[in-house]
Amino acid sequence: MSDHGPKRKPRPSEPDQARQSLPGARAEPDPAGRAARNRFEAEGVPESVRGGPVAGSLQPQPSVGRDELERWLADELCLARFRDYCPNGLQVAGAETIRRIVTGVTASRALLEQAAARGADAVLVHHGWFWKNDDPRIVGMLHARLKLALRHDLNLFAYHLPLDAHPVWGNNAQLARVLGLDPEMAQGKPGEAEVPVTLDADGLLWTGRAPGLGTVGDFVRQVEQRLGRAALWVGEVEAPLGKVVWCTGGAQGYMNQAIEAGASVYLTGEASEYNTHLARETGVAFVAAGHHATERYGVQALGQAVAERFGVAVEFIDIDNPV
Ligand SMILES: [Zn+2]
């Protein structure tokens, strides 16, 4: 999620632009086929007998139609349920047939460049473009990004709140998995699976326990270990750990709801100045573990689901972002 605080302008921070020239992207193995194609070229095998896109295999590479993928994602992520401040779904149309998808947290220029370099047909992200209060003109940063997408025929699929809230693939569900949290669950409709208990109507503010952890200090240590980064936090190291409430991304504005619900600690991605005073004056610990760091996992789970459903190649690329 992005900036849910009532005092915040509703759009995600995009500091990855500032770091795009740094070596943030994970080193990736050679995309399937490139090494083999090079081998064919070295051996002088004529183009006509080199096979399809997966070199060395006579099997055609699996693909999915752009419209079919869009429909499936809309259905699975229950898009109709959400009122969001960006369009969810296909934001930029590219190739009609999709064989290779690159996923990432934000559709930054660095991510698009990586996708283009890998010959991807689509980019699937949590933070897309066209936020409610954005300048609607195609200039500056957006122009550069859009030019890149159009030049490489890249589809851009973006899912914001629906991907925060999804009970299995969502950012909150996946963060719980990564951190070892046990979400509170309730019986769903008769005959259906249990559903997570959330403190808001959109299913964004999750609540649960952290099994095996006794204090706020233990909790912070575990968060830092599992996310591989330092967290910004305010609280007492020795305070007993009870109920944990969390919401990924820029959800510092939800802290009061967490306090009212009896949380011992509130975990989100970003911090505001007032979170310190809330924590000190209510005794509820506040942990900001990074907007990017807490939202890396939903899009990976969604990408894996797409790969399993359609057989297409899906690769997550982590463009480093310290915020
Ligand atoms: Zn976000």
Image: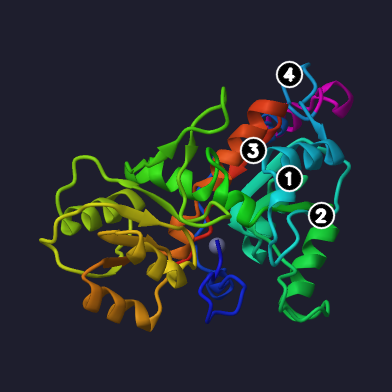
Q: Is residue 29 left or right of residue 276?
A: right
Q: In the rendered structure, which amino acid carries the disc numbered 2?
A: His
Mark number for residue 120? 1
Asked whether the residues under the numbered discs 2 and 4 touch, taking CB atoms below 8 Å apart as contact, a structural biologist would say no
Asked whether the residues under the numbered discs 2 and 1 touch, taking CB atoms below 8 Å apart as contact, a structural biologist would say yes
Q: In the rendered structure, which amino acid carries the disc numbered 4?
A: Ser
x%, y% of residue 160? Answer: 64, 57
Mark number for residue 314? 3
Q: Which of marks 1 and 3 precedes in the sequence?
A: 1
Which residue was labeled with disc 2?
152
Element type at mark 3: strand
Q: Which of marks 3 and 2 precedes in the sequence?
A: 2
x%, y% of residue 118? Answer: 68, 46
Q: Is residue 266 left or right of residue 47?
A: left
Distance between mark 3 and mark 1 Cα atoms: 9 Å
Distance between mark 2 and mark 1 Cα atoms: 8 Å
Distance between mark 2 and mark 4 Cα atoms: 25 Å
Q: Which residues are magenta?
A: 38-52
Element type at mark 2: loop
Say which of 180 and 299 sits in front: 180
Distance between mark 1 and mark 4 Cα atoms: 19 Å
Query: Residue 48, relative to residue 184: is it above or below?
Result: above
Q: Which of marks 4 and 2 precedes in the sequence?
A: 4
